[in-house]
Image (cartoon, coloured by chain):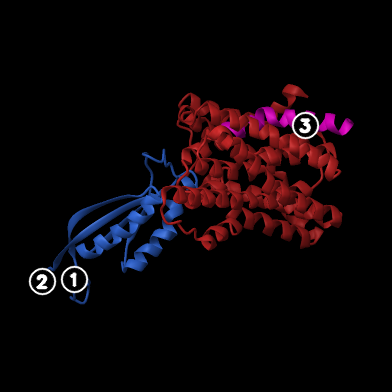
Amino acid sequence: MAITMSPGKSVQIIVNATFENELIRVLDKVGVTGYTQIDARGNGYSGVQDGHSEGETNILFIVLVASELAEVLIESLIDYIKRGYPIVVYTNDVEVLTTNKYGKPTI
Amino acid sequence: MGLDSLLIPAVLFFALGAFAKFINSDLKFPEGMTKGIGIYLLMAIGLKGGVALSGADFSLAISSIIWGIILGFLLPIIGYALLRFRNKINSFDAAAISAHYGSVSAATFLTAVAFLEVSGVEYESYPIIMMVIMETPAIIIGLVLAALARKKLAVKSGDEVPKTEWSPLLKEAFTNGSVVVLIGALIIGTVATPEAMAKVTPFTSEIFMGVLCLFLLDMGMEAAKKANTLKKVGGVLIAFGVMMPIIGGTIGVIVGISFLGFSVGGAFLLAILSASASYIAVPPVMRYGVPEANSSYYLTLSLGITFPFNVVIGIPLFYQMATMYSAL
């Protein structure tokens, strides 16, 4: 079976846990079909996020998308950042294995 | 009285927690434990209140609810006015902070209950319903004040007035986990038969004070952690963190005795409710609803200043105040 690696973007988004539902709505709206999320702890502009309470827990979202969709997604997040939500966004160029178990590409 | 009020295990465990952080101990609760204990405490106090309510006076219960709503709206407005005095604190921070001070801290309330029980002082169960009622109005006031500030800012800079989406915010205010557990347990305690309730009392009453000690041990550690950010917060806000509970507590004593006819114990509990600031239910709502406000301000204030102030000074102070006022 041939290995199919497709180029794309990995968009990583770090937000407070209280923003989780809103972010999922945004992902859905721009057409992201899947994501991975990890509970995250850290320190920075919003102070120590030690996971002690709901307001002090961060979440790291990892979204693998085509480059065009990455742009749309980031643009829709800028709106929230302007409104004061602390959101960290960064991207990497990635090669994603896009062959599913039936041998067809998934993206 | 006096030092005795500090020598109850719950308060001592609070001090132990703070001390543990102070000496950099590696003491730490497993993840999620505090949340679990918090749910247990709310459930237990809700059931206790429910049982007491089933034999309570209906009209007094209704007036307690009405006063709970009035205080819930009044306290954050007083707080906001104080914070905005001479434009010292920006409107968004003031809105978010005053929402915390209008709402209540269940842990402070429970420590006050522990204090009354150790001292053998009787108290009414109505303040427990008032605790449930007072969780929410302040959140709404905070959100409204922030929306007004947003509008004012947009008009000033000539921008389009941003729309606030109220439904998810209000949903969060009313379906808040603590509110659901408290009201639910209150109803269960009211309707369950006494025989059936007797079966659960070992879990809800007898071990209650011990569990509260554990909870306060963790709160002590959290409060001490917040002490590190005090410098960032500044003198004006620290002064507010001490002044606001004194104002709230005084109002609570007056309303409890003069308007609701509570005993010293009941009025004292209402004073503690009015003096306390939320640090579990309100912060996540404000973080999401008022992103412009600095979140380290309100958490440091309510958990790092007002909670220890109430536990150590507020409890004996408001008890004395209620005793003296009722003797007038």
How far apart are the two marked residues, 1 and 2, measured between alpha carbons? 9 Å
- Frontmost of labels 1 and 3 is 3
Residue B309 belongs to the span the image colors magenta: yes
Separation (CA) of disc 1 from disc 3? 70 Å
The magenta region covers: B305-328
Residue type marked 2 = Ala
Q: Where is residue B274 in the image (x, y as percent from the top left)?
A: 70, 40
Image-based side of A48 in relation to B91, left or right: left
Q: Do dots 1 and 2 share one subunit?
A: yes
User: Toward the viewer: B112 or B165?
Assistant: B165
Asked whether the residues under the numbered discs 1 and 2 touch, taking CB atoms below 8 Å apart as contact, a structural biologist would say yes
Q: What residue type is labelled 1?
A: Thr
Camera sees residue B257:
yes
| Chain B palette colour | red
Principal SS element in the magenta part?
helix
What residue is disc 1 on? A99
Task: Tell which circle, 1 or 2, labels the residue nearer the N-terminal end.
Answer: 2
Q: Where is residue B76 in the image (x, y as percent from the top left)?
A: 63, 44
Q: Quadrant of the N terminus of chain B?
A: top right
Whether A2 is among the magenta residues is no
Which residue is labeled 2 in the image?
A: A2
- Please rate how many residues cluster around mark 1, counting C-alpha atoms within 10 Å: few if below 14, some from 14 to 19, many from 20: some
Disc 3 target residue: B319
Dot 3: element = helix
Give the residue at x 80% y 38%: B254
Classify mark 3: residues with Cα within 10 Å, few (<14), some (14-19) or many (20+).
many
**Chain hosting mark 3:** B
Which element carries disc 1, helix, strand or loop? loop
| Label 2 residue SS | loop
Q: Which amino acid lies under the numbered mark 3 shown in the image of this protein?
A: Tyr
| Residue B202, visible in the rendered structure | no
